[in-house]
Each structure stands twice: as C-alpha cells, then as structure tokens.
Image: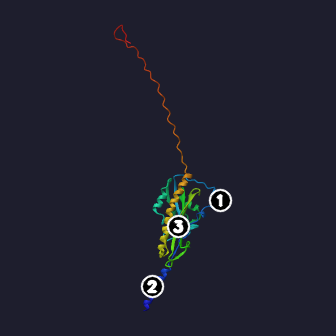
Amino acid sequence: MNRRILVSLLALGLSILQGCATYTTPAAGVNMAALGDGDISALMSLEPAVQFPARLATVRVQSSGYHSLTADSYGSGQFSVVTTRDIESADDLQRLASQDQLSAVAPMTRLILPQELNTLRDLRLGAARLKADLLLVYTLDTSFNVESTALGPLSAITLGFLPNKQAFVSATTSALLVDVRTGFVYGAAEATERESQRATVWNSREAIDSARQRAEAQSFHSFVGEFERLWQATLAEHLTVVEPEPVAPPAPRPTPEPTLTPSLPPVLDPTPGTYTF
C-alpha cells in the first residue's frame, strides 16, 4: 500500500513539474539608430564611396547575450552577432546574391569580428577584412502575444496553463545598408510578419519555438523583397553610367588619279624604204 502511494506521489510530482515547465522568449533585436555615430555634423559629412559592381557582406545582430533554441550569439558589448542561419532560407539568400551590380555576397563569421561589439565601426572592420564594399546589417525583433497580453523579451511562458485564447508571434526584420569605407548609410528596409494559432497548442517549448521560427522566417522572406527595392533605389542614385566615347566615322578614301598610258614609239618595218606607224 505504501509503495502504491509513493508511485502515485511521484507521478503527481512529475505532472506538476511538466505543467510548470517554462519557455523563455528570446532577447530583443538591436536598435539600429544606436549603432552609429551620434554626432549630427559627423553624420552629415559622410559620403558614399562604393564602386559598382560591389561586394556585399551580411551580418545579423541581436542584443547582447542573445540565445534561442536554434541559435546562439557571439560577442559582448552593446550587441552580439548571430552566425547560425536558422531562419534564412537558401532561396532567400540566393535572391540577395542575384541582384544587379553585386559581384559577391559573403556572410560575416566570428573569425573576423572583435569580441567587443559596440558600434557599426566594429562591424565595418570585419567587413573590410572580407574586402567588402557594402555591409548589410539586419536584426530580428520578435514579440509573443496571448490575446491582449504582450510577452516581452526574456519573458517566461508557463507551459500547460495557457488559456484557450488566440496567440500569435510577431517578427520584424530591420536592416541598414552601409558603406564599409565611410560609414555612409544608403538606406533602411523593414518587414513584419505574424504567425497565429490557439494558445492551447503551446504545450511545449518546441511548439512555441516552432511558431517563433515560422514568424521570423516569413519576416526575413518579406524583408528580401524590401531589400530588392532598396537596392534598386541605391543603384538609381549612386550608379554612374559611363557613356562610351563617340566613334568618328572613317575618313573617305581619296579618289586615285587616272593613269595615262604612254604612247609607244613607231615600229620600224624591216622592209627597206618603208615605215609603219
């Protein structure tokens, strides 16, 4: 009898532990405005220096200490870098690389980045090691909502006790296109997508994180379309088209002077006393 009671208590304890398990929402994205130089005069003095066709480096940044079930981050300071491609599909990356006047596209890795990351200049140094002309810096900001309740970054969601209400994950991809040499910002792009479902489906960490991944992947996919528009606007403003030098038509060849046939001397007739002309 005591053994049965002990087994029952253990089963009850396991069910309580499972019901009290939590999912911690990932840290927030990065405020892009905080990455640059805050001095207005310095910002106004920046000039573009890109030469087309250009080489593009890409990097995803998140807040310091970012972690999810599918990716970790590198670096300390004001932000960190995520080098794992967990939400960027191969098709979307191929679309980025296939833009006009792009000779090469390369992701940045931790091998070329400093440990301390505080400003865009730290990222530009890494891009310069890749001999890149331009740097695409992007971040994902993801929020979790259950009906009207917003769950911010690093919030603990208790599994098994969510109400039977509508829940959704909203993800926004924001990016800057930066000149590696000068820090000049060519423009910004942004896209937001939402993944909705019933909150009762969020019965495990994997289920909630799967909703996050779908929302972030859809957001990045939409962002690629926004980047294409930004890139075309950048080319329209900064691509210098060199017109070919006009080729002069060949000079007409001079008309040759007519050749006069010289008159021949009279032929002497062998017959004595007569001449033939």
Could you say whether the residue bearing mark 3 is in a helix, strand or loop?
strand
Q: Which residue is drawn at 57% across and 58% down?
A: 187
Amino acid type assigned to the residue bearing label 3 in the image: Ala
Amino acid type assigned to the residue bearing label 1 in the image: Ile
> Could you tell whether 47 is left or right of 85 in the image?
right
Q: Nearer the viewer, mark 3 or mark 1?
A: 3
**Of 2 and 143, which appears nearest the observer?**
143
Q: Residue 40 carries which label?
A: 1
**Of 5 and 110, which appears nearest the observer?**
5
- The Cα atoms of the two marked residues, 2 and 3, are separated by 38 Å
Amino acid type assigned to the residue bearing label 2 in the image: Ala
Could you say whether the residue bearing mark 2 is in a helix, strand or loop?
helix
User: Mark 1: few, some, or many residues within 10 Å (few <14, many ≥20)?
Assistant: few
Q: Nearer the viewer, mark 1 or mark 2?
A: 2
Q: Residue 11 carries which label?
A: 2
* Earlier residue among tags 1 and 2: 2
User: Mark 2: few, some, or many residues within 10 Å (few <14, many ≥20)?
Assistant: few
- The Cα atoms of the two marked residues, 3 and 1, are separated by 31 Å
**Of 61 and 26, which appears nearest the observer?**
26
Residue 247 spot, x, y in % from top left = 51, 39
- The Cα atoms of the two marked residues, 1 and 2, are separated by 64 Å
Task: Give the farthest residue toward the top.
Answer: 273
